[in-house]
């Protein structure tokens, strides 16, 4: 029975993670949720149009493994951050974010995807390495970029993709 003990423990832990309900960090006070234009939403309320986690933090630290994450950034001193997706995805809405100097998003995407939603007049520079993956900028092409609004994408994309949109 010794040879089966470790695999059984690993399978039991996997089942425990799969069958437990999803936990959130709302109890820690890290996320503020809002309806449209500043109306506060109580925990447990749902909006009809979007199900983003709203954050006022200045940096992002997102890890998505076998799952998906949606975030809307409202910070007016946004400094960039790190996004890691392994067999999962992340959707980041930067339409309400603001910053004064170029920021860097460090992406690590392996068999997953990242969707960035940002204004069409922000400049996007890609310094990421793509291996059987890619970065697709689907925003309307603009020639009048705002000089201070530059987002630099760094990192590695393997068997996945990054899509950039604006609404």
Image: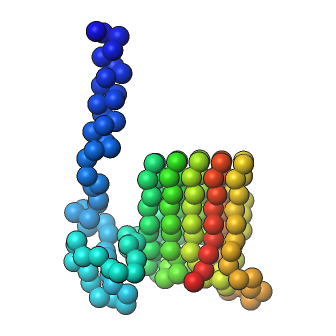
Residue drawn at (34%, 36%), measured in percent from left and top? 14
Q: Position of residue 155 (x, y in %)?
A: 64, 53
Left or right of 123 in this view: 62: left
Residue placed most toward the observer, 140 or 15: 15
Which residue sits at x=25%, y=47%? 20
Residue 77 spot, x, y in % from top left: 48, 77
Q: Is residue 12 visible?
A: yes
Residue 108 screen position, x and y as percent: 58, 51
- 57 vs 27, nearest the viewer: 27
Q: Is residue 78 above or below residue 127?
A: below
Quarter of the image containing the C terminus? bottom right
Judged left or right of residue 146, residue 80 is: left
Q: Give the residue drawn at x 29%, y 76%.
A: 46
Q: Is residue 55 visible?
A: no
Q: Residue at x 35, y 81 (%)?
A: 48
Decide which of 61, 69 is in the foreground and name it: 69
């Amino acid at each position: 029975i010794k040879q089966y003990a470790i695999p059984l423990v690993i399978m039991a832990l996997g089942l425990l993670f799969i069958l437990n309900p999803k936990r959130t960090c709302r109890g820690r006070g890290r996320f503020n949720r809002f309806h449209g234009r500043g109306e506060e939403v109580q925990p447990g309320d749902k909006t009809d149009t979007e199900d983003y986690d709203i954050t006022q933090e200045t940096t992002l630290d997102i890890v998505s493994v076998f799952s998906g994450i949606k975030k809307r950034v409202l910070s007016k001193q946004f400094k960039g951050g790190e996004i890691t997706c392994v067999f999962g995805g992340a959707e980041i809405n930067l339409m309400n974010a603001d910053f004064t100097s170029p920021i860097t998003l460090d992406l690590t995407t392996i068999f997953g995807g990242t969707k960035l939603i940002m204004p069409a007049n922000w400049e996007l520079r890609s310094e990421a390495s793509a291996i059987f993956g890619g970065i697709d900028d689907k925003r309307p092409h603009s020639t009048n970029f705002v000089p201070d609004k530059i987002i630099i994408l760094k990192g590695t994309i393997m068997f996945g993709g990054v899509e950039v949109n604006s609404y």
